[in-house]
Image (cartoon, rainbow, N blue to C red):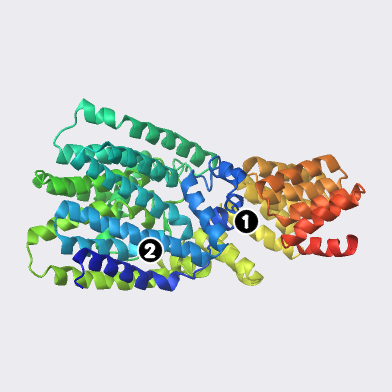
Amino acid sequence: MKWDKSILYSLAITVLACTIYFSGINNSFTYLDDHVQVVENPYIKSLDANAIKGIFSTFFVGMYQPVTIVFYAVTQSLFGLNSTAFHSLSLLIHIINGLLVFKLTHHFLKAKQLSFLLALVFLVHPMQVESVAWISAFSNLLFSFFFLTAFWSYLNYRATKNIKYIVLCFILFALSCGSKSAAVVFPIILIAFDYYFLNKIDIKLLLQKIPFIAVSIIFGVVTILGRETAGHLSDLTGTFSTLDRIFLVIYSFLFYPVKFILPYHLSAFYPYPELSDGALPLIHYFSPVLIIGLVVALISFRKNKLLLFGSAWFVITIALVLQFVPFGNQITADRYIYLPLFGLLLILGFFVQKLKSSKLTLLLSIPLITLSFLSFQRVQIWENDETLWTSVIETHPNVSQAYNNLGSFALKGNKGNEAFNYFNQAIEIQPNYADAYSNRGNLYAQAGNSEAAMKDFNKAIQLKPHADAYFNRANEYSKLNRLNQAISDYTKSIELEPRVDSYTNRAFTYLKLKNIILAKQDLKTAQKLNPNYGRAYFLEGIVEQNLGNRQAACAAFLKAANLGDKSAQQAYSQTCR
């Protein structure tokens, strides 16, 4: 049987992707958002009406991505809380995206072998590893899948004028926005395609884009609200001047094509640069010169539609992450190039075709082997939090967040002394790092040093009034039997971030104060937030026991016991049997 070349190429794409990424298929959930988005996410535990309602009405880590959370929920319902299942899903979507890139590049380049090689670059480039190996970056893969399929549908619509393709395009675009808000630039991509390949932008074509633009505006507004609510919008005015921030944006734009060509010193975290005598590193001041050079070079090829569209694709899809509006605490991230890479591949394809080399395979095979090797190595650093943040320190030794997170990882492994040293290093690098003070305060509290613990909690709250610090200080107040102060801090923590453990601990404090009514209210809220949180049902059993309701107490103890709460198992054995 003679196999079609497209099938053979597709098989090769799949095999190579599996070869590179399979070693990371059993990597752990990381505490870099994985636990918030997946492990502790109450809405993926089931697919009932309440869960679906929660998914579509809740921000996760400051982002609105309900379609992504639905995929998490389906994976959880089929395979349980198994990191291998989630990593396998990421790999599957990445492979499909590679096949889509193969199809789309072939549409533009009309060269099957070259399109195949470019699709391999998309799959194996080491900057793509973060999107595939980090479970919390699944939204990046999923929105790109819907984005690329929506674009493919639009190409079919332009070729056939069949209305079903534009309807499908709109549905896929909406799903892309629901997967990650970065998809809002899709209408601009369509306008760019119309301009370069249809040679026109008329009223009819623009009116056709109105539904797409409306969806983009809605998701854009929702995203800004979510980021602001979560405190992700950064105020850089105290560190960088307006001129500095302009240079930072230009530098971050150039970062991606440069790293695409020379993927060296890649990191899971890229900190903002340190000022020296009030000045940025010199490379930032040279960035505008390089931008001007690129624009001049592009003008010289201004008649080539493919090159211009590839450039437009890259600029449009990368624009949202260039820190025009600063968010987060890092200036760039490998995952941001995932979809924009398609534009760079079109540009690369254009220049390779210009060479008209008969040794095309040899021309790209050596870089592909190198990229594959680098990606295989980068997959290993995502094994767990320790390997991840150790790798960051090797590249950027002064990232305080890396030491703080290594401390948290050591603490979970009962390595208190090691954790203490990491927290101290984080504070030494960044004396105003609230999270590190809060975490070190927890260590002091565990060691019974309440005075040092309270000092660190107070410092953390002074620097940045955030939910964790209030929660930790409330726990210490409760332990010291300063119950009213504990209630006050739990309340402030809940106001900043309503979490199940905050409600449960406040309920326990209300119980100590003999305030049964408020305790029951908090426990009901906790159970609503997470129906599988055993401690909330155990405390409900204690409440009912205090009220003399043995049957209700035993029912609550049994439910908590079935959810794995050991205190409830003991209480049920002693009280109900």
Amino acid bearing label 1: Tyr
Is residue 31 among what the camera can see?
no
Percent across and percent down for residue 550 are: 90, 52
The answer to whether residue 211 is seen in the rendering is yes
- Numbered disc 1: secondary structure: helix
Q: Between tags 2 and 1, which lies in front?
A: 2
Position of 52 compared to 213: left or right? right
Q: Position of residue 455 (x, y in %)?
A: 70, 54
Residue 404 left/right relative to 553 = left
Q: Which residue is mark 2?
A: 129
Residue found at x 52% / y 55% = 74
Number of marks in the rendered image? 2
Q: Is residue 29 above or below residue 496?
A: below
Q: Nearer the viewer, residue 332 or 340?
A: 340
> Toward which corner of the image does residue 538 lie, by quadrant?
bottom right
Q: Residues within 10 Å of mark 2 (few under 14, many from 20)?
A: many
Residue at mark 1: 437
Q: Quadrant of the C terminus?
A: bottom right
Q: Please name the residue shown 82% across and 54% down the image.
A: 555
